[in-house]
Image (cartoon, rainbow, N blue to C red):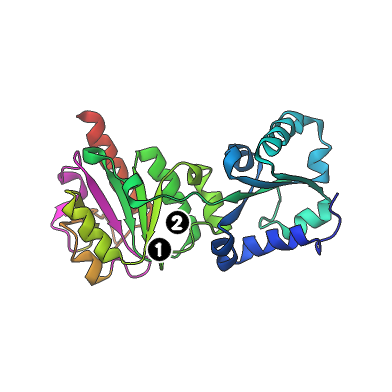
């Protein structure tokens, strides 16, 4: 049993939770909680850490048997950790007693495309981890084929983002581009229509046709889309506002657009 926060494995977990650079260098990240740990695939599992009290609770027997079997198949580490040590490294106020180190999924741009069924969410400089995680989770629900982000968008593997995805991080393809403008032009060459959520939009978002390959552009929470990126879109669309509201939360705007595309495609 690990009884010290100075244990090398615990130091590494702590680094992965706190440092984006460490996550990128090792191509691994940390997930916390039974659901997130159980949903990790065998091939992605590197290590599982279980708090002593969680290990000793008979109610957790089935989960632990499953995880021990997975660890054996993956040749992954399985360690019990003293409760005080587990709490000291956890990223949450009330730790759920189990965490895992997992290999990052990786995708090529081509894996996000599905012919006429292509349905993309394209993000420019989203800064709030919770917003990004919510978009990933909602994107899965709305049937997106992938999410494209520029490199100044918050780290997808930030612990807060991972929690907000509620497991969708394992299933939604994504791609981080070095040059968002160039990527958009390449998508357009492949016949994908790009729509920018913008205050200057002439048409309401529910007046366009999203039944063919398309992508929705969502900008930074404070500043929206940059002029450079917005101008590359095929069409500006707007979300009508009542009262004195000027704009919606970025994740809510993305949800409305993705689900409108989903609604139209279900009606085809």
Could you tell me which secondary element the residue under label 2 belongs to?
Answer: helix
Q: Residue at x 45, y 56 (%)?
A: 131
Q: Residues within 10 Å of mark 2 (few under 14, many from 20)?
A: many
Q: Is residue 58 above or below residue 245?
A: above
Relative side of 70 to 78, left or right: left
Task: Look at the numbered discs 2 and 1 and tell me whether their residues touch, using CB distance below 8 Å.
Answer: yes
Relative depth, front residue between 27 and 230: 27
**Main SS of the magenta segment?**
loop
- Among the 4 quarters of the image, the one containing residue 85: bottom right
Relative depth, front residue between 12 and 76: 76
Relative side of 253 to 67, left or right: left
Is 89 magenta? The answer is no
Relative side of 16 to 136, left or right: right
Q: CA distance from mark 2 to mark 1?
A: 8 Å
Q: Residue at x 35, y 38 (%)?
A: 143
Sequence-wise, the earlier of marks 2 and 1 is 1
* Residue bounds of the magenta highlight: 200-225
The residue carrying mark 2 is 131
What is the x, y in percent for residue 91? 66, 58
What is the x, y in percent for residue 8? 77, 61
Could you tell me which secondary element the residue under label 1 belongs to?
Answer: loop
Mark drawn on residue 126 = 1
What is the x, y in percent for residue 189? 17, 54
- Among the 4 quarters of the image, the one containing residue 52: top right
Instruction: Using the rendered image of the protein, determine whether residue 249 is visible from the camera's viewpoint.
Output: no
Q: Residue at x 19, y 29 (%)?
A: 268
Is 204 magenta? The answer is yes
Q: Is residue 22 above or below residue 113?
A: below
Instruction: Using the rendered image of the protein, determine whether residue 74 is visible from the camera's viewpoint.
Output: yes
Relative side of 132 to 257, left or right: right
């Amino acid at each position: 049993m690990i009884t010290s926060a100075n244990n090398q494995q615990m130091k590494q977990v702590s680094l992965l939770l706190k440092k984006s650079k460490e996550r990128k260098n090792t191509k691994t990240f940390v997930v916390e909680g039974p659901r997130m740990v159980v949903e990790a695939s065998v091939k992605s599992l590197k290590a599982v850490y279980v708090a002593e009290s969680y290990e000793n609770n008979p109610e957790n027997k089935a989960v632990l048997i499953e995880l021990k079997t997975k660890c054996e198949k993956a040749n992954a580490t399985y360690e019990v950790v003293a409760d005080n040590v587990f709490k000291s490294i956890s990223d949450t106020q009330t730790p759920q007693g189990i965490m895992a180190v997992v290999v990052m999924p990786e995708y090529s741009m081509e894996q996000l495309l599905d012919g006429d069924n292509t349905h993309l969410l394209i993000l420019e400089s989203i800064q709030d981890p919770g917003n990004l995680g919510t978009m990933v989770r909602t994107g899965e629900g709305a049937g997106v084929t992938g999410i494209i982000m520029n490199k100044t968008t918050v780290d997808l593997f930030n612990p807060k983002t991972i929690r907000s995805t509620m497991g969708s991080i394992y299933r939604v393809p994504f791609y981080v581009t070095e040059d968002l403008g160039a990527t958009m032009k390449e998508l357009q060459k492949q016949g994908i229509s790009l729509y920018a959520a913008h205050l200057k939009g002439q048409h309401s978002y529910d007046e366009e046709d999203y039944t063919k390959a398309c992508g929705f552009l969502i900008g930074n929470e404070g500043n929206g889309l940059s002029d450079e990126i917005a101008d590359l879109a095929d069409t500006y669309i707007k979300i009508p506002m009542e009262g004195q509201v000027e704009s919606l939360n970025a994740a809510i705007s993305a949800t409305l657009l993705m689900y409108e595309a989903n609604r139209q495609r279900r009606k085809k």
